[in-house]
Amino acid sequence: MLVRIEHLSFSYNEAQRSPSYALTDVNLTIDDGEYVAIAGHNGSGKTTLLKHLNALLLPVEGNVWVSGLNTRERGRLTDVRRAMGMVFQDPAAQIIQSTVEEEVAFGPENLGVSPEEIALRVARALRASGLEGLGERPCGFLSIGQKQLLSIAATLAMEPRCLLLDEATSMLDWPARVRFIETIEGLHRRGMAVVSVTQDMDEAARAERVIVLSEGRVAMDGPPREILTRVDRLAVLGLEPPSTVRLARKIGETLHGFPSDLFTVSELADEIERRVRGKRHRKGLRSHVGAKGKNA
Amino acid sequence: MGKDTMGERTDPAAKTRREGRLEFDLFDGIRIGRYSEVHAPLHALDARVKLLLGVLLIAGAAASQGISSQLLILCAVTAGFPAARVRLSEGFRPLIPVLPFVFALALLQLFAVPQFRADARVLWEWGLLKISTRGLAAGVLLVTRFTAIVAGMSLLSAITTASDLASGIEHLLRPLQKMGVPAHEFSLVLGISIRFVPVLTEEASRLMKAQASRGADFGYHKTNFVKKMRTMLPLLVPLFLTSLRRAQNLVEAMESRCYTGGKGRTYMRRPKAHPADLFALACAACVVGGAVVLSVFGADARMWRWLGKVL
Amino acid sequence: MPVPLIEIRDLSYVYNRGTRLAVCALEQISVEVSAGEVVGILGANGSGKSTLLCHMNGLFKPQTGVVRVDGRSLADRSTDIRAVRRRVGLVFQNPEDQVFERFAGDDVAFGPRSLGLPREEVRRRVKEAMEAVGLPFAFKDRLTEELSRGQKRRIALAGILALEPGLLVLDEPTANLDPMGRRDLIASLKGWVLGPAPRGPGRARERAVVIVSHAIDDIVELADRVYLLAAGKIVAEGPVREVLARRAVLAKNGIQTPFCASFMAELANRLKSPTVDAMTIDEAASAVAELLKGNNRLQHPMGKARPSGNG
């Protein structure tokens, strides 16, 4: 098990007389290689939860175990953080060094890895994130999309078990976003666990599992197909379903009996096509028999 | 084809958001020098050596008293520009904003240097104002010294990247780490500061545009200091908040990558001194040594006497 | 024919013109916005959007070409640029970063106050501006540091609306907003451009909005007309439906096709039938419903079919 969270509660202002809790009694586990999306309205605690996974925040109540280590254990902080690589929302704000190579090497250098091994890791990480050949480039000259890929490379160099993404695509334009998601999904296919906080429901739909937070608690947890088709429940939680589900729903409003549990584009298109061809077939039969068709 | 500098930043391919020469252009004042991706002999020097060259240069120029010494150093620097593939016109460009100031000081030297030495000949007199050979010498010395130092700094910034600066300082200070000097932390701070100067400048530029668009008037005609500060608030407050936020983000990023200070860190690239580095250092030492020697042995005095005979 | 609110003709702009580092940001841009319109300028990062934006209220002076607001050229010396900046309200990306006053109401009042307006007038404008963005007047006493991003953004927008511009220009208005915040903002913008109730029969709307963005959904929901900007040039212009149906052109220039448009195209492909331009979920749903109710072809509810293909 990669992550185990038990009775996690957290408040940013616990010292006050009546503190407000950002997270209340959160319980969940995450396995190796899982691709989890965390969704929720603004202020639901998504980012707060994510930061507990690499011990940037420590629980006020409850416990968080990462790779079998309790995040409260002071001596093991490095081990926790090397296992969980985080990519933040603002591409420019998380770059520490001046050149691409140096940035990617920063992590392994902190871990005391030998220089030869660092060089290997840097080369591997740049390749895996599609930034091969850009080693000498000063970071200021990368596009926003490339900067975000650089952050992926920088975490990969630490050989983590899981990537934590904090709304990592929200500042990217479409081409950069596509490239970023392709890179992440490629890494996932090769065994990397991914926990991605996102506002984009179409993006959340691509994950294996969706956790919906509301007011600091887990409101829903399951496969995207189950979670993201429950339109009314999502509306109560302040979320919209992905575009395909919205379209299916809308069609169902005028056309009673149209299924509302269609999830992917192909499913929706298949259903519509099936019905059209069915009608055409029936119409064909009727005119063959001689009855009037329903032609408009 | 990119350029990285300690001040200016451009890359046509990346279509940067640099401002043009307008009321909101803040970039021009920050330029110190230029670094080009062209690989010239001087670029390949060890970062520590580059910094040491700088120290030697300043020490040499400051310590030597004679114009001849300064000229020697200046010649060495001028010879350095081709070795760094920098055109002389570009290399001496940073002097331009400084020159008026320097000449003003020189003029002061001209008139103000005490005239009471026996060998001071008065060249020109008008009422209380006197120009003597001493004054002239002092003025010329000032100009040449300034020129030598600024040109030298220009050469250095042309061959030194921000990474070099941070890495050089860190590795120079590393032996002191045992005594508790936080070498890596210091170099990290330096590197980040340099890198964020253009970032914050752009931020400020954007803020100025945004605030101007909603009626802010950045006090071009306010004379009262307090009022002037008040008009800067729409710029200063958000800039301050943004900087704090960026600092916070950066800290989180560093912690996520397990940064715990300089102890126990390894390096992907360990600077290693090559013969070329030692050669460069030796050359610089000779030049500086020569300058000091000239100064000590009064080459200047001889030169003036000779000039005096000729004129 | 009434004069367009803003008219840009053959505008070109080159950063670092005349130097080795010249970058052409805009080339022969012509844009026109008249009262009552919502116009979109669609472009990916690096297309020149920001540069174009800065020309609209005189922050940048055109190098070649002309920019006219209410018929007056901005390059004309007699034009009062500050008046232009009141007439054209420019809202930069993430405007919540500009908020600097302690109390929300003060920040909204900053613009009117810097105009030297009397207290009552300032109060009236602040109230109206806050209502236009969906905030109650009582909100003025909230501390800005306690506001959420969405709330701060509305305050920043109100600050510009309080100057009572005729043309509102917004850069990426919904960037970094959650779906709720986005919906509220779009509703506010739609409400604002409609303006107060017409003072008499036949009175046209006097306001206009320009949305500069790469977010296709914003343009679809708000704009009537759109210009597609790529690499500093306008590569397409026209009614929103027309331009956004040209999926190949959009994709080539880094713009995502709206979900509905690409879905309908997929459907048309499968059914071997002409495609229908549906830009929003509602339209797509209606079209599909019509199809399934019995019409054998994909038909736009208004009866207009379009030839399939990528345009």
Image (cartoon, helix red, strand yellow):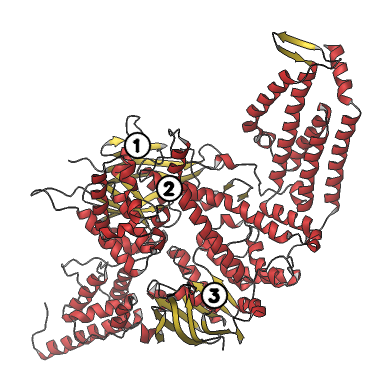
- Which residue occupies the foreground of this view, B128 or B65? B128
**Residue furthest front as drawn:** A17
Numbered label attached to residue C43: none
State whether residue A146 appears in this view.
no
Q: What's the amino acid at mark 3?
A: Leu
Image quarter for residue A113? Answer: bottom right
Q: Which residue is mark 2?
A: B234
Q: Position of residue A204 (x, y in %)?
A: 42, 77
Q: Position of residue B43 (x, y in %)?
A: 74, 49
Q: Which residue is mark 3?
A: A57
Within 10 angstroms of label 2, few (less than 14), some, or many (20 or more) residues? Answer: many
Q: Position of residue C288 (x, y in %)?
A: 22, 76
Image quarter for residue A23? Answer: bottom left
Q: Say if B300 sits above or below A154 in the image.
A: above
Q: Say if A239 sits above or below B89 in the image.
A: below
Within 10 angstroms of label 3, few (less than 14), some, or many (20 or more) residues? Answer: some
Q: Say if B193 sits above or below A53 in the image.
A: above
Q: Which residue is mark 1?
A: C81
- Which residue occupies the foreground of this view, A236 or C176? A236
- In front: label 2 or label 1: 2
Q: Could you tell me if the residues under marks 2 and 1 are in contact, i.e. CB atoms within 8 Å?
A: no
